[in-house]
Amino acid sequence: MPQFAETAAEAVADVTDGATVLMGGFGNAGQPMELIDALLDSGANDLTVVNNNAGQGDAGLALLIKERRVKKIICSFPRQSDSWHFDAAFRAGEVELELVPQGNLAERLRAAGAGIGAFFTPTGYGTELAAGKETREIGGRNYVLEYPLGGDVALIKAMYADRAGNLAYRKTARNFGPVMAAAATHTVVQVEQLLPTGSLDPEAIVTPGLYVDIVTVIETRTPSAAESERHPAVRPHSQEEGVRV
Amino acid sequence: MPQFAETAAEAVADVTDGATVLMGGFGNAGQPMELIDALLDSGANDLTVVNNNAGQGDAGLALLIKERRVKKIICSFPRQSDSWHFDAAFRAGEVELELVPQGNLAERLRAAGAGIGAFFTPTGYGTELAAGKETREIGGRNYVLEYPLGGDVALIKAMYADRAGNLAYRKTARNFGPVMAAAATHTVVQVEQLLPTGSLDPEAIVTPGLYVDIVTVIETRTPSAAESERHPAVRPHSQEEGVRV
Amino acid sequence: MSLKVRPTAARLSRQELAQAVARDIASGSYANLGIGQPTMVADYLTPEQNVTLHTENGMLGMGPKAAAEQVDADLINAGKVPVTELPGASYFHHADSFAMMRGGHLDVCVLGAFQVSVTGDLANWSTGEPDAIPAVGGAMDLAIGAKEVFVMMSLFARDGTPKLVQECTYPVTGLSCVTRLYTDYGIFHIVDDAGRRRPQLVEAHGLEPAEIQERLQIDLVGM
Amino acid sequence: MSLKVRPTAARLSRQELAQAVARDIASGSYANLGIGQPTMVADYLTPEQNVTLHTENGMLGMGPKAAAEQVDADLINAGKVPVTELPGASYFHHADSFAMMRGGHLDVCVLGAFQVSVTGDLANWSTGEPDAIPAVGGAMDLAIGAKEVFVMMSLFARDGTPKLVQECTYPVTGLSCVTRLYTDYGIFHIVDDAGRRRPQLVEAHGLEPAEIQERLQIDLVGM
């Protein structure tokens, strides 16, 4: 059963120095910006961060890197037009990079959540990113052995949670949320709206509550945008009763 | 893009002798009974069947086995109080059995659909069902290497399809449907109702249409039961326009 | 560590055993109750415990068995019995359901057994008879698929031979997986004893601890 | 097999190249258009082709780029550009999205490239410069993740060196994965030629086939 935090600061208070932190989001979609900001404020240090990118602009993960709080980043696409804080830290040798093809990143997270010990993937075979890795030919195709990628903590963003911790996402903001929630020992979620248990339809829940440890409500959309929309996971009439923590 | 078959017979007409057929369902929930009956009528022979069980009573898969049309069955739980046709065929040495723990069965199907070459699973380690299989200790835990299980054809059942082949299921009838749809070269689905494209909500679709090759409509629920129910995947008012093939 | 275990007067009935298991499931747990005797545990869980039940055929938040007028062919448990849905439930497919178990996300799984070994090996899927038709279902996944694996069984077979044994003679379902064993004559925790897993008797019913140890012919921790 | 390829007068513009690729995507296909030049292909797909677009960040049925008033921060493509949703669309998470690719369920994937080898090796993720910050994204997954992999690129680099090469000198993205190569001067299919993959020129633009072969310094099938 999840706990409910009043603030983002409270939600990330248990992240310790040295933790491996899985951060959801692809671009800004699904990025738990307020939780990452709270992590910055928390002072947690020596972090290993797993994200698709390595921070953009002067916000969120980019600031964690700027402050040299990230010792290692595991991602698929660090280089962006506005990834200057990562670029500087990397060139200075002050952050370690593990570059992983995006689909292998997603599958390694999935394996961690699903209790798979390792898996053979065709992605990356014969490339620099598979250098030194175990390979095998199976059924005439070549594969690379990849290992699970779990985290101590996941920081993710969803659209709705109910009191049982069940989550529903919105459009392409779903991205890494469901696999990271399952891959982390401790999953912290920021949601736009918290609803009573029973408000989310069991057929349309994407992340069941057993993967969720802490929920905090942070409205980032205008209330009218959130409320005018019919999301299939929300049962009719349950939204008016939406509670705020 | 899926094709639409007028009848179950037409839907399974392409199943050839010697095919590996993935059959959805757990107990009667999600079992594509009418497609299996049509397969019986089709005369297809020397089949390898993947299902959770090995037929029950005097219907569906049990009759295929009774008629000795199944040369091999890959399943987790063949022995049931009413699996007499399998029991007889097995004791007579007329059907081969590959017994797979249920979670390994699901994961092997998933691996086939996801392009994974093989995976290490803890399930079954140290047991008779892992005898002769490759094992490995990873991170202090023991695992067995298991291979993907794909099919030439999947026969599954869903609640709704739209014209783009997107599927939504109902309650625990979802079970093996989504993984089998992805694991087969050719996926045949029987649905209760076919709706215009756009009627199923993109957030609540479980099997995207690219996994579906043939759809046929077979009503097995009373229309009132199907229509009185609000399923979150069906957008409001789209059901009245429901088309029948 | 030595524990003074005082026996109750009589061995536990099947109902009392289910009650004892239910009592030991921590509040707020996610649990899977296996087919057969473990299913009875649900009857003794209190609403205050707020336990969420998983069924491996694709559901969390399973409710009680369906009454006649509630029966829905699309809503069954792993034993293929019609059940109900509680608020907060969710549905998912088989691969996701077993990923949830294999990934260690369930707090506890309760299973029946033919035999349990002193190190927590479990034998519950096959009696190994040569002419029997084998069937395993989800037994091997359940055995390794929870943070805690509780087993319920009678401590002795009908012929009086112990079912808590030095080494399983029936085909095993999983190795070193059982964490607690609930039996009519006593409750055992399989604990780490100087680097080796061994059973500790924590409750005795109808027999003195010394009698239990003598009849079992195995070493119990602290005795 | 020998093909008479008659060249057109001028090499193809970027628009004409996108049009040629669009024309060759079979009706009813599921396709992924990579970031950059391949994105332009969408502009030339006709409604009659009924092509469904996949974006690896979790969507099938992606529509055109969002107009200003349609922009939704939660609805973007793999290039992080706001897009729209078409009827019949569906959303899924990253592991499901890449499973869809890796599992070979997409009919075609269109990618840009630095180099393609005669056997269809693809180099498009890194120039191998020692001080460059590496980034791969979904390139390696896309390279191996469709039944057909179409590559769009100029046939020659700015300095005139061929980009269809005997062996890639840039770091590879995937081996033997390219099935067709669309360039300004010609379109090539990588075909099986007596057990060995080799390019076959199927269209020439602005250069005679013999000139193309000479400038490339590689063997083309049937020439």
Image: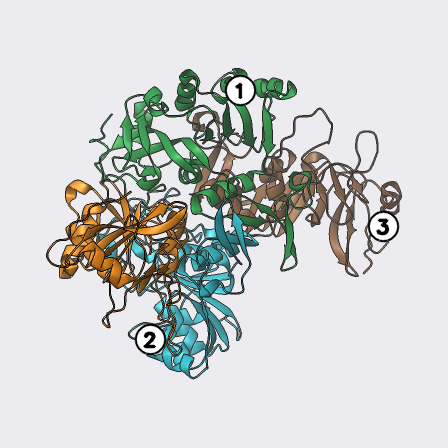
Chain colours: A green, B cyan, C orange, D brown
The residue lying toward the viewer, choosing from B25 and C19, is C19
Tags 1 and 2 on a common chain: no
**Label 3 is found on which chain of the structure?**
D
Please tell me in which quadrant of the rendered image residue A160 appears: top left
The residue under label 2 is B83
Residue A77 sits above or below residue A93 on the image: below
Residue D115 visible in the snapshot: yes
What is the three-letter code of the residue carrying label 1? Ile
The residue lying toward the viewer, choosing from C199 and A79, is C199
Looking at the image, is mark 2 or mark 3 nearer the viewer? 2
Question: What SS does tag 2 mark?
Answer: loop
Q: How far apart are marks 1 and 2 (CA)?
A: 62 Å
Looking at the image, is mark 3 or mark 1 nearer the viewer? 1
Query: Would you call the spot at circle 2 few (<14 residues within 10 Å), some (14-19), or many (20 or more)?
Result: some
Q: How far apart are marks 3 and 1 (CA)?
A: 50 Å
Which residue is at a point 23% across and 59% down the rendered structure image?
Answer: C212
**Label 1 is found on which chain of the structure?**
A
What is the three-letter code of the residue carrying label 3? Asp
Question: What SS does tag 3 mark?
Answer: loop
Label at residue D219: 3
Question: What SS does tag 1 mark?
Answer: helix
Q: In this view, does D82 lie to the left or right of B38?
A: right
Q: In this view, does B53 lie to the left or right of A135?
A: left
The residue lying toward the viewer, choosing from D54 and D13, is D54
Instruction: Please state the horizontal and vertical placement of residue D18, each as a whole percent of the image.
Output: 66, 39
Which residue is at a point 69% across and 25% down the rendered structure image?
Answer: D132
What is the three-letter code of the residue carrying label 2? Ser
Residue B234 sits above or below residue D69 on the image: below
The residue lying toward the viewer, choosing from B56 and B140, is B140
The residue under label 1 is A65
